[in-house]
Image: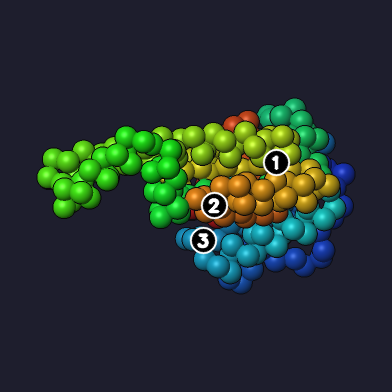
């Protein structure tokens, strides 16, 4: 039977509560696999696992329990290995990397910040920053709306200015929040967001980080910011954007 992996920790990590259940229905018993100085928190993997609410919560609950006893490298929902031997093999093969990551991520959490534009507010800002757009808008107004070509030109100018503003705001957001974080991971681009950033934050600095986010929000009313956290540091298990642990531990279903 394949093995579901919740996270990786030190072999000296305190044990989980007896009888703790994980993903699946009925819940699969959670157990510990040890290899050298490392251990993996695992259970048997249910067949046909999908990111249903119950299983997502079970995955998070196991990580929360494990994280209460010390640093844990969290695997994303759906990280599955062929069997227990495969898991311990990965632990042995990548022990130096995982031990370094455990040390680096100890006492730290992840905050994900997504930013988008408030459409009306950003249009006002673009108008105030661009005299040419203001002049053409006024000329079209005085001409009763302007010709088709004039309206098309104005629309193209506004779209280009908004796109430039998106790029500038994404860079500014990252540069503003980086000083109050230990590391940053740039997430994949997606429709609707001009920035998708994950920050690794010392738990003791969480309040300072959230204060910095609020300062950005107040100083940039044309930005809509969505903050999710504190989270297990999924995006920092591997260098750069997070991946499931090891080439032999894959994700069988979507992320959280």
x, y percentage for residue 213? 66, 48
Answer few, some or many: residues within 10 Å of disc 1's Cα (few below 14, many 20 plus, some between 14 and 19).
Answer: many
Q: Element under label 1?
A: strand
Specify the label residue 32 is tagged with. none
The answer, for residue 144, to whether it is visible in the render is yes
How far apart in space, not on screen, are marks 1 and 3 (Cα)? Answer: 25 Å
Q: Nearer the viewer, mark 3 or mark 2?
A: 2
x, y percentage for residue 93? 68, 29
Q: Nearer the viewer, residue 109 or 246?
A: 109
x, y percentage for residue 120? 41, 55
Left-right relation of 111 to 77: right
* Quadrant in the rendering for residue 147: top left
Specify the label residue 221 is tagged with. 2
Q: Element under label 2?
A: loop
How far apart in space, not on screen, are marks 3 and 2 (Cα)? Answer: 35 Å
Q: Nearer the viewer, mark 1 or mark 3?
A: 1
Which residue in the protein does label 1 denote?
Answer: 200
Specify the label residue 51 is tagged with. 3
């Amino acid at each position: 039977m394949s093995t579901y992996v919740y996270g990786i920790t030190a072999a000296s990590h305190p044990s989980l509560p007896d009888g703790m259940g994980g993903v699946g229905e009925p819940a699969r018993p959670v157990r510990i696999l040890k290899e050298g100085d490392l251990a993996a928190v695992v259970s048997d993997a249910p067949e046909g696992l999908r990111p249903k609410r119950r299983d997502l919560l079970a995955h998070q609950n196991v990580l929360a329990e494990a994280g209460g006893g010390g640093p844990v490298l969290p695997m994303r929902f759906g990280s599955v290995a062929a069997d227990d031997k495969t898991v311990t093999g990965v632990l042995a093969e990548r022990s130096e990397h995982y031990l370094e990551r455990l040390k680096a991520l100890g006492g730290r959490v992840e905050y994900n910040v997504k930013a988008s534009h408030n459409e009306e507010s950003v249009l006002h800002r673009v108008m105030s920053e661009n005299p040419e757009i203001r002049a053409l808008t006024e000329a079209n107004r005085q001409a009763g709306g302007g010709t088709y070509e004039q309206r098309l030109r104005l629309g193209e100018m506004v779209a280009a200015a908004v796109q430039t503003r998106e790029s500038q705001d994404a860079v500014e957001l990252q540069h503003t929040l980086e000083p109050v974080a230990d590391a940053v991971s740039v997430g994949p681009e997606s429709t609707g967001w001009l920035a998708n950033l994950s920050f690794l934050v010392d738990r003791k600095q969480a309040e300072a980080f959230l204060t910095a986010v609020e300062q950005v929000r107040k100083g940039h009313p044309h930005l809509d910011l969505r903050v999710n956290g504190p989270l297990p540091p999924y995006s920092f298990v591997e260098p750069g954007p997070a991946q499931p642990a090891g080439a032999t531990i894959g994700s069988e279903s979507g992320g959280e």
